[in-house]
Image: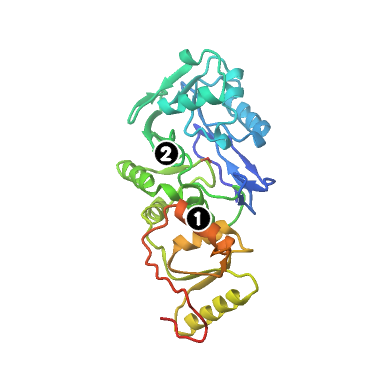
Amino acid sequence: MKDTFISNDIVYIGADDKTIDLFESQYIVPNGISYNSYLIKDEKTVIMDTIDRRKTEEWLENLEKALNGKKPDYLVVSHMEPDHAYNIGLISDKYPEMKIIGNEKTFTFISQFFNIPNLEERKVIVKEGDEINLGKHTLKFFMAPMVHWPEVMVTYEMTEKILFSADGFGKFGTLDTDEEWDCEARRYYFNIVGKYGMQVQALLNKAKTLEIKMICPLHGPILKENLEYYINKYDIWSSYKPEEKGVFIAYASIYGNTAHAAEELMKMLKAKGVEKVVIADLTRDDMAEAIEDAFKYEKVVFAASSYNFDVFPPMNEFLHHLSGKNYQNRKVRNYTEWNMGTKCR
Ligand code: FEO
């Protein structure tokens, strides 16, 4: 069930997108995606990020309703990727007195993406640890470069102890999607920020110094309880440790023989007592899910035939993705002449 209540002073103004076919033009999102945005109402009123162009109208309606006739004093820009930044130009034109809070890198991007009148007078450049008081609330800024772009920063609201975590702790799926957090948050994590484990670890180390009562990400549900659970998941994922015991078999088969071998291997492993064995057909299954599973499980089997003096392309693509996402901390052994007549070594 959709739960967007944050507090009396902090209002959710984002939108669900249930009709997008591919997020970032590459990831299937069967349950859509949410573009989160928030309004902090105080002596100074602050918009925490804009949203994707696909939901501009709904966002503006939500914003105006939450503003209730007031004008925003600030827009905080956590991330310049267009799923959050698209409406910066529009909202800056609509409210010409509004100042824009970002870091040095944010404004490098803004100048490249938008032509904002009087930007020099309107920009508020923040650095690591800087604070801005709004009245009852105070925002404190922490830089989070490469989680997921170079300019990313997160904001900690010190009074209500809320972390606005940008893409961190995001999840595929709209806010009214009734599903466990882990699976689609993990698929989101490894595919979107999986490459940047070191940078996520740096951010987690900063988060450890804060008392956090709520996490407001830019995608997915607002996290209100049991925050150690989610932080622990992020710690495992970003340190490239396997999350679960088990074997993931990823195969790419041309005529079905490699597929048959992979299925047989699954049966053999199960017969030997391996409790968790999962399998993916890289030619047909969701590649993003396969990437997630490769990170999730302790052991992975890659099975494919050769092709054009190389590896069959769906496997090649899979390996390319894993390499791009800094796949590591797994032992790999090469079996070039594997056939089902011999014993697994
Ligand atoms: Fe949701 Fe990196 O943007």
Q: Nearer the viewer, residue 178 or 331?
A: 331
Q: Position of residue 324 (x, y in %)?
A: 46, 51
**Is residue 260 left or right of 126 when viewed as pictured?**
right
- Residue picked out by circle 1: 320
The residue under the point 39% across, 49% down is: 197
**Is residue 243 left or right of 185 when viewed as pictured?**
left
Q: Amino acid at mark 2?
A: Ile
Residue 12, above or below 328: above
Give the quarter of the figure containing the C terminus: bottom left
Q: Amino acid at mark 1?
A: His
The residue under the point 47% across, 56% down is: 322
Q: Residues within 10 Å of mark 1 (few under 14, many from 20)?
A: few
* Residue 42 makes an appearance in the image: no
Task: State the separation of the CA atoms marked 1 and 2.
Answer: 37 Å
* Residue 304 makes an appearance in the image: yes
- Residue picked out by circle 2: 162
Residue 90, above or below 154: above
Q: Position of residue 38 (x, y in %)?
A: 53, 34
Q: Position of residue 242 (x, y in %)?
A: 40, 63
Q: Are marks 1 and 2 in contact (CB under 8 Å)?
A: no
Q: Quadrant of residue 71?
A: top right
In the structure shown, which secondary structural element does the residue marked by tag 1 occupy?
Answer: helix
Residue 200, above or below 84: below
The CB of the residue at mark 1 lies under 8 Å from ligand 1: no
The residue under the point 50% across, 34% down is: 8
